[in-house]
Amino acid sequence: MRVPRKLGFTENMISFVKRFLIALIIIAVLYALNLAMSKTGLFGFGVPLYQVDLWKMAGINIILAVSLNLINGFTGQFSIGHIGFMAVGAYSSTFMTVYYTQGLEQWLAGMVGASVAAAIVFALVIIIGALAAALAGLIVGIPTLRLRGDYLAIATLGFAEIIRIVITNMNKVGGATGFRGCVDPITNITCSDPSLGRLTIPAYTNFFWIGFLAVITIVVIYNIVNSDMGRALISIREDELAAQAMGVNTTRYKVTSFVISSAFAGVAGALYGHWRLPHPNDFTFVRSFEIIIMIVLGGMGSITGAVLGALVITFVPEVLRMLPGGVYNYRLVIYALMLIIIMITRPQGILGNYEIASWLKRARKRPEGGGAIGGSTGAPIAEQSDSTKKSAKELENR
Amino acid sequence: MDTFVQQLINGLNIGAIYALIALGYTMVYGILRLINFAHGDIYMVGAFAGYFIALKLGLGPSWGGLLFVLIGSMVVAALVGMAMERLAYRPVRKYARMTSLITAIGVSLLLENLFVALFGGQGRGFPQLINDTNFALFGNAAISKSQILIFAVSIALMVILQWIIFKTKVGTAMRAVSFNLNSAKLMGINTDAIIMFTFALGSALAAAGGVLTAQYSPTIDPLMGITTGLKAFVAAVLGGIGNIPGAVLGGLLIGVAETMVVGYGSNIGIQSTYRDAVAFAILILVLLIRPSGILGTTVQEKV
């Protein structure tokens, strides 16, 4: 493990200013993009609405894929229940927005203006969504993470389906018809009395929020993976028994990474809920598979791979819509075929275990690391492991 | 008591179908350690194959026609299963298990979307191949001819499967391969052929399940395999995946539990809309007590 050199005060300040500037630039870029993502913004050169929606979906998928990668790719615990935590985040945050935050927003609007008040309230409900999903992750994780491999996979899938079915049976959040706004507790239909709660869920989510939180997700997961905790997680992935023997508290680390991963799924859910209005059918296990496809396609155990996979899976079906008439009906068949062919020809995913930054670094043969933004600090994870090879060995040992 | 018997019959019926599908999951898992997510769609392919055979031949209600449709759809599904193994799974077999899993999801999407593109997403009425009549048991409980058919055929198929696995040469080879693939290869077993045969066998069983279900509740659509397939998979895991009697036990258990919740759940505060959650709830409870299923064996991990 790389021992970090102690930095002096000036060096510290320089590094802090550098990071601060980078953060400012990212926020400025996102803000400009957000303006571009509307008809009137950026002097009328806006992006069409349909493409805006696609980019928003891509951002949400990035949050989901990168966070799932923490538990599936880096910790090696195979979970197919990610969508369940997204559902928890979506429903808990919209529930708060509809029934509880109206007064708060009005009160704040009187002091700081309507748009800032909406932003504060949205940030608050996103945090609530994340906490609710984290709590669900803790409740699900503690019992199930004792299980191994496929049993863990099916148990997480089961929990996600149970969450969905429970939500479908909750009248207060719209049940099987989806959650649009406040529901009268007596008649169980959409209420007409605004004092009971908001009649519609406000569309807080815009591209800025999604982009900003996607960047936060990537930064947080990146820092976790490159910390002591990340080393522990990777050691669990490589060999749980050996990690335990080396003094890694495997249960604690597994549950922690599961909870963090769930919390980010909750964030994605909160963003989704305040954009598309949550519906139980949005959270079926088929969507969980989709997120897994993203991370496997991009390369398990690679953050940039997960981002890439999320982009590919979001855009490819839409690009296939451009196919001419006769083939058009078969676009999803082509999509499935592409998936199978990629798995046959590039089983380790597009990037394998590597990050894009470490690829570039190797290509340029730089004498020393550092400099490039997001250039990986420690050794690339890939050099310590080769999951493909290992699994092949396992297969032989059976 | 009458309703209880009725619910039990209905539950065992659904359970028998789950068991037929679960057998395919468990056999493939036992040999390749692969969760074949496309297996539920093979069940759908079987139902569609039966539909088209009956339609093209213009078969009316007759025992011979039914037998022909049943065997025909089993053969078609077995061929599809073998093609699936040869074209999609064999090339990725040597890679990480995750790759195989995604390939399986890909095959599942392929079958579903192909059938939607070819035949449309709407449901189709399955032709009646037997004159369905009810036989009164005692009281108000009754059993229909198609229900008797489900019991008879699934029991017969399970007996045949048992015979194949334990009494024939190819069955011995299957057991050897599932015990240790490489040693089996060293003993001169053509493992590729055995794996293909396993897929064919599992697919045929699922197809039989598909035709029997379509006979009992006669609507089929390209997405019918998703939920049923998932529950059958849950049944396989519940019984201990890789274990053949376990798959049957798990299937029957889940079928009965589901109908009992629909029938009696409201008495203990569980609405019938929770029906689909029952399978998963049982699964999770069982896994917490026995982490490798009811009949599964725990493998002691060695350093």
Image: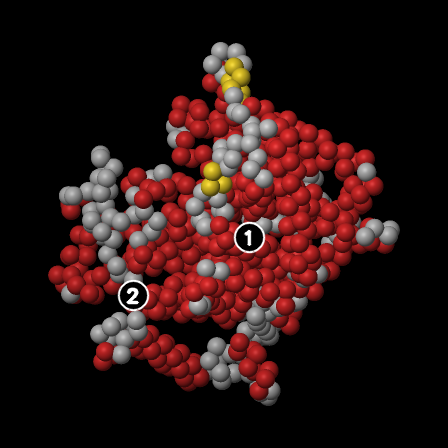
Q: Position of residue A149 (x, y in %)?
A: 61, 50
Residue A256 visible within the image: no
The quarter of the picture where residue B166 lies is top right
Q: Identify the chain of the residue marked 2, using the numbered disc in the image.
A: A
The CA distance from mark 2 to mark 1 is 37 Å
- The residue singled out by tag 1 in the image is B111
Q: Position of residue A350 (x, y in %)?
A: 57, 70
Residue A10 visible within the image: yes
Q: Judge by depth and name the residue closer to the eye, A211 or B56.
A: B56
Q: Is residue B182 left or right of residue A276?
A: right
Give the total of numbered labels. Answer: 2
Q: Is residue B181 left or right of residue A68?
A: right
Name the residue rendered at 41%, 53% in the picture: A86
Q: Position of residue A216 (x, y in %)?
A: 40, 68
Name the residue rendered at 48%, 64% in the picture: A327
Q: Secondary structure at mark 2?
A: loop
Q: Is residue A189 left or right of residue A55?
A: left
Nearer the observer: mark 2 or 1; the answer is: 1
